[in-house]
Amino acid sequence: MIGRLQRILRLFRPADWARFGLVVVMMLGAAALELVGLGAVPLFVAAAVDPSLARQNATAAAVLDALGADTPARILALGSVALLAFFLCRVLYLVLSYTIQDRIVRNREVELSCRLFESYLGAPYSYHLSHNSTQMLRAVLEDVGFIFNDVLTALLNVLRQGVVMLTVVVVVLWREPLVGLVTFASLGLFGLGFLLSLNARLKRCSSDEHAARRRRYKVVSEGLAVLKEARVLGRTGHFAGHFRQAAEKLARTQRFSDTARRSTWPVMELIVVAVLLLAAGLMVGTGRPLQSLMPVLALFTVALARIKGCAAEFVAGLGQIRYRLSAVDAVHDELQALQAATPAAPAATPSPAPVAPAAPAATPSPAPVAPAAPPPGLAFHHGIELRQVAFRYAADRPRAVDGVSLSIPRGASVAFVGPTGSGKTTLVDLVTGLLEPQEGAVLVDGRDIRDDPAAWGRHIGYVPQSIVLLDDTVARNIALGVPDDRIDPADLRRAIAAAQLEDTIRALPNGVETLIGDHGARLSGGQRQRVGIARALYHNPDVLIMDEGTSALDTGTEQAVIDAVEALKGQRTVIMIAHRLSTVRACDRIHCIVDGRLAASGTYDELMTSCPRFAQLAGAAADGTTPAPSGAAPRGA
């Protein structure tokens, strides 16, 4: 358990621990107040039994005289006010201490959850291809909360209660060494036995609880994602059954944890009462007068009453920590995996001198068109070049892209075609910078895009195969991440027009401010795809990439979008992936990809005569059949 708790240290930065040091200092202050409080109670009881004892100390007598406490009644009244004022100050100090502690803990929770989420967003795309999104969701939304609510807060409380109990024990042992030693040894023995009886079961429940929560997230996510198919096939019971199994397993673990936590207080109360009776019997057995034992009995009563609460919270806190340690392991492992997957920023190295790639001989290069407002960083004036680019998703799989070299002049329209699984989407992911080539390089104006991937991304508008829409307005979906006060109406109208979305917007009750539902549920498939195209065009990109970007459109709408895209020729570089070859007929150059390799390049008519595989693809498209898939790419790209 100690080794796993050390993982908490690695979740925080040095500055965080300076703040927790303040919490520890305030704990020591609370312990000092506890020490004073324990000493004040027996003194007050002794003064109440024999007020003359209050004047045995010269300093105390002088204070009493100065305050006019010259009778037993006045001495008792003054003592009552002083004791009440002290405990009031103690309460105020503890409230301040708890407030500071909670503020520090909650701020650290926000920072860690944001740090984990930002790490996911910044992780290489390949990381997301090999990790489950529900696991990431649970780590950010649940596990971080468990670390702070159920582990760190409990750990701080265990330390606080431990310091208070140690203070109480020291005071009692100083006043009554022998009786105190027997009393607290008995208390510790019984308390340790109770804690050990829960330890193994809580450890097992911790692992079971984490697995059950992860399973619930996975089943719900998958069940809702395939709802239409499951309803049609009558398989909803499959997901409901798996969810019930996970929910019941989670309930069993929580049931034991809750019972153990609630049982702590009555069990510790029983132990404390038994120990208090033992202490009273030992003191009476010493033969001392009962009057002299009253202050000592008061001290033991207050001390054991205080220890009862502290011990109950101490034991419950240790159980809670044990139960939630799996969350610490999960977040720690996620951060370690993210750190390992994210390469360190390379040292700045001089890039090759910018060279304009030569345009293919068969296609005249359109004149370069300067962007209206070029993004800072990586410049794009001439073209894109792939030099012997290779990539594989796993060491034991064949290459998805294998030694591809080609050039895309600025302002040209090009297409990648090929059978399913040939590596087209992987190739485009390499061009966008989502994936990094394991061999070769992707160059823009002679510079490797890895020199400044963020700057290169600002040149690109991307339409993926599957459009993901937010449960928000049309405007916010198109502008994607742009604050409301910075959404440009002119850019919005331009993107909507280019995506042939104007009629759809006019038909919506609130125009671009209409809420479109979860994943765009209130739009048709074709409308969702056109919103995705408008999103790609909103930022007025230099490069427009369409990965099957018209696949969900009807023939008429598809042709309208293709016409709009063709209107960008010479102004924007267009890269398309398509199965329906009719959509790429007008492209300046078509690259046929087979088994991750560049099989041939040329215009549509050139490839029909010179590349049998392209002619086969064109024939299959005309017949409405599906060409044989390629075996190289593991992602069906």
Image (tube, rainbow, N blue to C red):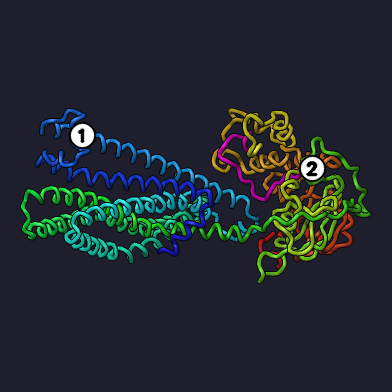
Q: Is residue 604 visible?
A: no
Question: Mark 2 = which residue?
Answer: 542
Which kind of residue does numbered mark 2 sit on? Asp
Start-end of magenta stretch: 459-477
* Image mark for residue 13: none
Left or right relative to 142: residue 588 = right
205 left or right of 510?
left
Which x, y percent locates residue 548?
Answer: 71, 50
In the rendered view, does 554 fall on the left or right side of 247?
right
Name which of mark 1 and mark 2 comes first in the sequence: 1
In-front residue for pair 284/160: 284
Residue 308 falls inside the magenta stretch = no
Mark sitting on residue 62: 1
In the picture, the quarter occupied by the N terminus is bottom left
Where is 604 relative to 372, above or below? below
Q: Position of residue 331 (x, y in %)?
A: 50, 56
Q: Residue at x 72, y 58 (%)?
A: 436
> In the picture, residue 52 is in which quadrant?
top left
At horizontal 27% and vertical 63% (from top left) the residue drawn is 192
Question: How many angstroms separate mark 1 from mark 2 (CA)?
Answer: 89 Å
Nearest to the observer: residue 529 or residue 427: 427
* Furthest-bottom residue in this view: 396
The answer to whether residue 470 is magenta is yes
In the image, residue 498 lies at what x, y percent? 75, 36
What is the crowding at mark 1: few (fewer than 14 residues within 10 Å), some, or many (at least 20)? Answer: few
Residue type at tag 1: Ala
Residue at x 63% of width, y 60% of height:
341
Relative vertical location of residue 204 with respect to residue 495 in this rendering, above or below: below
Quadrant of image for the C terminus:
bottom right
Residue 179 is left or right of residue 85, and the answer is left
